[in-house]
Amino acid sequence: MLAFLLRTAWKKLWTLFFVSVISFAVVYLAPGQPSQIDPLNPRFTPQQLERYRKAFGLDQPLPVQYARFYKQLLTGELRSFKDNQPVLGKIVERTLNSLPLFLVGTILVWCYAFPFGIATAVKRNTGFDRCTTVLVFALISIPGFYLAYLTIIFVVDTFQVDVIGLRTFGREDVGWLYGAMDRTWHLVLPSLLGAAAGIAVLSRYVRSQMLEVMSADYVRTARSKGLDENRVLYHHALRNGLLPFVTMLGLLIPGLIGGSVIFETIFAWPGIGRLGYEAILSRDYPVVIALNFVAAVLTLIGTLLSDLLYMLVDPRIRL
Amino acid sequence: MSAKTVLILAPTLVSLFLAQSYFWVPSFSDQVRGDPGRLTRYIESSIGDASILNPTLSADSASSEIAGLVFDGLIDRDMDLSYRGRLAESWRIFEEAYLLVDETQRLPDGGPVTAEALRRRLEAALAAGQPSLAAVERIEVEPGRELSERVEVKPADKGGPAKTVQLALRRPPRLKFTLREVDQDFFAKLDRLLDGYVGRIRPTRWLNPGLEPPLRERALELLAATEHNPVIMFQLRKGVRFHDGQEFDSRDVRFTYETIMDPRNLSPRVPDFEPIKSVETPGRHTVRVTYKRLFQPGFESWGMGMLPEHRLNPEALRAEARALGRDPDRFTARDSNFSRHPIGTGPFRFVEWRTDQYIRLARYDGHWDGPPNFREFLYRIIPDPLTTELTFYAGTTDEYAAQPHQVERLRDDPRFMQFSGLALGYTYIGYNMRRAPFQDERVRTALAMAINTQEIISYVLYGQAEPITGPFPKQTDFYDPTVRPLPHDPAGALRLLEEAGYRKNGEGWLEKDGKPLAFTLITNSGNEIRKAVMAIAQNAWRRLGIKVETLALEWAVFINERVNKADFDALVLGWSMGLDADIYQIFHSSQMGPFQLNFVGYRNPAADDLMVRIRQEYNRERQVAMARELHRLIAKDQPYTFLFVGKWTALYDRKITRQVRAPDGSLRYAAIVPTKLGSPKFHFNQWIKVPQPVGGPVHAAR
């Protein structure tokens, strides 16, 4: 077990190194400049632009910049071009903001998708199945931002309440209960919208997985033992159909830092996804690359976790 | 409990909990009832966050807007766009001019040229009432002196470090004239008076011929035959205090200038202040600014916010660096916490800044011009325009950049009031005049005549724009309203092209000497209006028989690869302008190089001359006359097809009004009136929100 862990860690470190090189190269070689070095400011002289490049260390050879960059990142000294704040602090703060969205969304997706998927599998080719299939594919294929806009317009038009941001903006001298409920209300739309598509996708996986195992002998055996139908489905069938979801569960962890760029931007949610998006737009290299790196680390941890989870779910798998 | 029950019950409970929170939040109609403080809070929404709240270091509009509330400048513009004193109570502009004394020459009467002889001669003319010396107040002799300074020299091969070299030279005596007002033609008049003496001065005579080029250039600057030094004397307002209680005085003005010019601070405002020779403080409330050369647009830059010297001077910075454990020698104003916690003299003081969420300012009760009515100003960041609009309808935003079509939709809505005005700037099609066929003025004019600008304004901009004929902001005096726009006349355009030698070939395409008239029109992607203009222009030109390809490029590629390298045929682009008449960087022929802004390669000696004279002219009337002449010249040359200037629109809740104190001491409500530019926020300090809209222009306040 320990040997396995060490071996995996070694391999993953190499992967991480290559990811760091590639993400650094991609960001630096892409066209464009940090927005502080705006070549179109009519009163900027080339000398001043040069001075800025120097201050940001952009005039050095790429390998030097690479080494300096990751050294600063690992020692926590890396600062954003945009506001000169430490990058790691920013990432932590934004991740905490994204966390409630992520938690509510995950609970809704991972809880609803299973009963829903199982129900459609059990009732396959009935009217219920056909209707839900249409609904699910509609949810999958309608772009998230479009659905978000429609929902926001509907809610604001009908109820005339604020749905943007972490809380109702400018409402300050209110009690803690009002404050807490205000924050809860602002979670509703972004988390539901995010969850809707998630439930749709995941329930389709559950459905196909269940269809596969439901015809297996042990399910028939369980039924013939006279077990309760729910116990047959959720205990005997589902457990054997769970394997692919373990992989997806592992990938949830990097999803935390990826956040939801679209919903966070539309809802002005100061989360991690929006941090990355805005950093890319303003070519804030330190933030972009640091986010990339952290995401890579989390992805690798996620895959490691799912490897370990496999053992738990399927006793046949041994390392 | 079975797995199924848990899987269904858990998320359902979560959803129910989420849903009930609806009953706790305020809606548009009752948000005031739940939180009365909302009336004293003004909330403005912006797409982008500020970056740095030090007005000498920021370059983006969000930062400037916040800095405008936290800091005061020495001057600003009043309702009619004339200058008005803020931290400066008054000012006077005059000139000190220097003339080199060349003792090798002879005076017109044959006498030798000495400083004393010249002075006596000119004083006699002055006493005799010589009109060309009318502005002269005083003539003095500046004795010859040894000058010495260190000059940075870069090695010719660009490699290796730059070295500094000591430059030493002897400058002959000079005559110093003090002029009541700035006169860029003073030396020309003097030259006539002295029979060409000024024109015959050869400064190279005093130069060591072996000097290296950078030293030589600097030496020639020091030995200039003539030198104009405009001077601004500011009288500062007394008793103004910064938000921390310290009194504002002339040292703060000088310090602000020094902060900008300190190379370590990387201030983007250096070009505005670079023409300054010195900033002196003869008194606690007197500032004397001397310019190296004539540069009228420099005056506007004194509207910039003034920094508190006691917070950012070297000792304060060193103390801050030590407290933060940073290297004090490398710690600059840019690193200081001040950029995120600014302290100024403005009507609002800074409270807090949550990146990408909001910036909070609070009323400064000690403001010299009287405190604002709003207790708080909140600058809210919402990255998406549609979302911003919806927060406005939910009552959690008081101001946002309303789009023309949004305003149009709400024209008759009694809940809102709206203002609109012309923007400062315009959209144009620029032609690369280094390339065929654009060298030919007739071709450029024909291309312009083929385009129906009115159609673009009606269908692309929903009527929220006006046609423009030249390079100045349309609402300023510099814009010549007598210049008629080119008519939309495709037949006339075709005649012009035929005149220029183009004939239709068998396939209906225009060609000259067997070569078809073909080019590519480009713009940046992401701007739908420019893309629409591009399509309309392409269609109009194709109908004439011109083969036009179009291409929309990502912004960075568009600017770096095409515009900066002048690698394009024609492009659709826009400028946003200031209120001054300085368009030197956009149209002067010296600005045609890579990375410079005259990327179309416009070259006209008469226009060049006017552009230089305009930025040197301190007399408003003469400046306006020259600007109008330049406008006519450029409109005739058509380096651009000037298309339109957009309108900006502002939308406000009708519950916002002005609360003013009448002479008898009672509070009254007054209507919001826009300035000449159309901006309604001139009286922002008097604004307040009331529970219900008040009608009519003036009402008694409760």
Image (tube, rainbow, N blue to C red):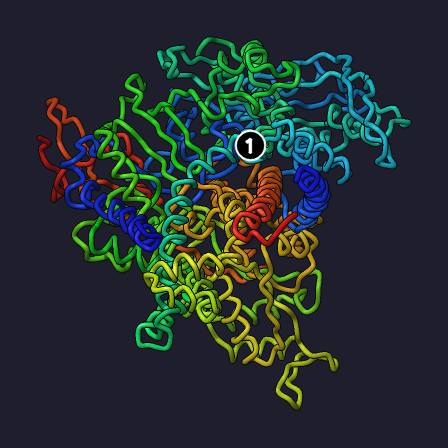
Q: Residues within 10 Å of mark 1 (few under 14, many from 20)?
A: many
Q: Position of residue B148 (x, y in %)?
A: 78, 15
Q: Is residue B405 above or below residue A185?
A: below
Q: Quadrant of residue B91?
A: top left
Q: Is residue B464 above or below residue A312?
A: below
* Chain name for mark 1: A
Q: Is residue B34 above or below residue A77?
A: below
Q: Which residue is mark 1?
A: A88
| Mark 1: secondary structure | helix
Q: Where, quadrant-wise, is the C terminus of chain B in this rendering?
A: top left
Q: Quadrant of residue A183?
A: top left
Between A158 and B240, the one lying in front of the other is A158
Residue farthest toward the right in the current orientation of the protein: B210
Q: Residue at x 52, y 70 (%)?
A: B535
Kind of residue sitting beneath label 1: Leu
Q: Is residue B31 left or right of residue A282?
A: left
Q: Position of residue B335 (x, y in %)?
A: 57, 23
Q: Residue at x 70, y 53 (%)?
A: B565
Q: Residue at x 20, y 52 (%)?
A: A159
Q: Is residue B583 visible?
A: no
